[in-house]
Image: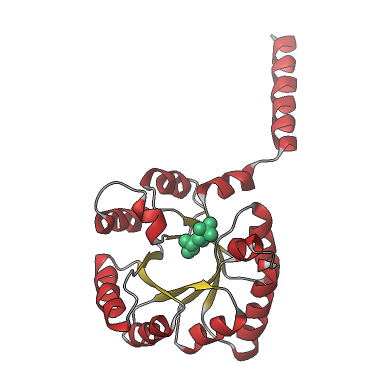
């Protein structure tokens, strides 16, 4: 299973990449809007850091605008993936860009029917948003289960990129269901490391070791 960082922050991405467990990055207009500097240069820097798929999203809402922006985003770096929303125009743009060999991540997916459309349009990645579904009282992981089943039935090559992960349980459930990727904010990656018994255990090992050294000295 691949783990992506959901962030546009260079420092956070550098820190996550240094751990050696990050396979790619997802950004969106809200995340990039928070960062200083030119967004194209920021995306280029992110590609240099992770050397894996980096999603940059179009802001146009019509197919021709999406294609124009999509070509520009793809030209930033070979690692760039063009993110388009799951609308009629977005699906048309996905089909056209994928046909040109440009990788597309179809985002804002909230139903299995939408995921099927993205696969039909040749998407490289589909991004179902589990946290935002949970927010409105619908179990986000049920959607992942449905997509895994549907894509498996037909051997679609579109990768399931579980997005809007809010805590480690989303990541664990995504892995148990066989999703290809989970994209997590840096805070969720931090939470994945933490366990009080690890800290307590390490502290005891080190104390016991020090005590034994003092006796021998
Ligand atoms: C994924 O590509 C999106 O950027 C992201 O996961 C959205 O997460 P949010 O619902 O926490 O904003």
Q: Quadrant of the N terminus?
A: bottom right
Tell me residue 201's x, y (percent).
Answer: 74, 32
State left or right for residue 85 relative to residue 68.
Answer: right
201 and 61: which one is in front? 61
Q: Residue at x 49, y 55 (%)?
A: 22
Q: Residue at x 63, y 79 (%)?
A: 147
Tell me residue 63's x, y (percent).
Answer: 32, 83
Picture colour scheme: secondary structure
Q: Does residue 24 appear in this view?
A: no
161 and 112: which one is in front? 112
Q: Residue at x 49, y 50 (%)?
A: 20
State left or right for residue 133 relative to residue 109.
Answer: right
The quadrant holding residue 124 is bottom left
With respect to residue 174, does 50 lie above or below?
Answer: above
Tell me residue 165's x, y (percent).
Answer: 59, 58
Q: Does residue 100 appear in this view?
A: yes
State left or right for residue 33 relative to residue 109.
Answer: left
């Amino acid at each position: 299973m691949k783990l992506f960082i959901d962030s546009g922050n260079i420092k956070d991405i550098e820190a996550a990449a240094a751990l050696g467990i990050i396979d790619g990055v997802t950004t969106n207009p809200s995340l990039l809007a928070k960062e200083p500097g030119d967004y194209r240069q920021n995306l280029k820097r992110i590609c240099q850091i992770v050397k894996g798929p980096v999603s940059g999203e179009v802001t146009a809402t019509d197919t021709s605008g999406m294609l124009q922006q999509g070509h520009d985003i793809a030209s930033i770096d070979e690692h760039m993936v063009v993110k388009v929303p799951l609308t009629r125009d977005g699906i048309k743009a996905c089909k056209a860009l994928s046909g040109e060999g440009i990788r597309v991540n179809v985002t804002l997916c909230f139903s299995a029917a939408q995921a099927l459309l993205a696969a039909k349009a040749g998407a490289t990645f589909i991004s179902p948003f589990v946290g935002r579904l949970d927010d409105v009282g619908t179990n986000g992981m049920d959607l992942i289960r449905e997509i895994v089943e549907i894509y498996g039935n037909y051997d679609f090559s579109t990768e399931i990129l579980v997005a809007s992960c809010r805590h480690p349980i989303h990541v664990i459930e995504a892995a148990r269901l066989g999703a290809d990727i989970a994209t997590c904010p840096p805070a969720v990656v931090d939470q994945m490391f933490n366990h009080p018994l690890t800290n307590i255990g390490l502290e005891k090992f080190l104390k016991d070791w020090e005590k034994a050294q003092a006796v021998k000295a």
